[in-house]
Amino acid sequence: MTARRIAALIAGLWAGAMLCIAAFAAPDAFSLLERADAGRFVNRLFMQEAYASLIAAGLLFAIERRRTRDAAALGRGSVLSADIMLIAGTLFCTVAGYFAVQPLMEAARAGQGAWSFGALHAASTAMFAIKGVLVLILAWRLGRPANDAQLKPSATTS
């Protein structure tokens, strides 16, 4: 199995997990459990997703960094590829959406802080949605067949 296929598999599993959380797990928790219990369950679910996202992004970054470095050494592109930028975007959304906003949400729930719980929840939701879109784009990009034209060195020489 090639590095690109492994990366596509990781991105696809990551995208699927995020879709399942957003479409089924979180909404069903609030429809089946008491509000406080559902909140605790969903909070734990998003904590696990955030750590899984860090692991997935780290693995994808390592794979893609090696692929882009090897391609750049052969004159086939830059080490700063679109896939690397998508991975960096997912990392930003994970850190900002969970690790930065979540503690603020706890403070807002306790009546502290300048921001309301609703505003912070909206910011966290937006970061999760943006990360989901970035992961879907990444999975799509990594899952498509490699373009032979992109793999050949440029024929123009001066």
Image: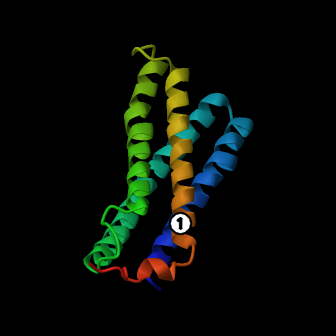
Q: Residues within 10 Å of mark 1 (few under 14, many from 20)?
A: some
The residue pinned by badge 1 equals 141
Residue under the image location 45 percent in, 17 percent down: 115
Q: Quadrant of the C terminus?
A: bottom left
Residue under the image location 43 percent in, 45 percent down: 94
Q: How many marks?
A: 1
Work out whether 23 lies above or below 10. Answer: above
Work out whether 34 lies above or below 63. Answer: above
**74 or 126: nearer the eye?**
74
Residue under the image location 41 percent in, 26 percent down: 104
Residue under the image location 47 percent in, 50 percent down: 48
Picture coordinates of residue 86, whole percent (x, y): 44, 55
Along the horizontal axis of the image, is 9 left or right of 98? right
**146 or 131: nearer the eye?**
146
Along the horizontal axis of the image, is 104 left or right of 33? left
Along the horizontal axis of the image, is 67 left or right of 158? right
Picture coordinates of residue 81, whole percent (x, y): 38, 63
Work out whether 127 lies above or below 151. Answer: above
* Snapshot quadrant of residue 122: top right
**50 or 32: nearer the eye?**
50
Picture coordinates of residue 130, whole percent (x, y): 53, 44
Residue reaching furthest to the front: 158
Picture coordinates of residue 150, whole percent (x, y): 45, 77
SS under mark 1: helix
Residue reaching furthest to the bottom: 1
* Snapshot quadrant of residue 74: bottom left
Which amino acid type is marked by label 1? Answer: Arg
Colour convention of the picture? rainbow
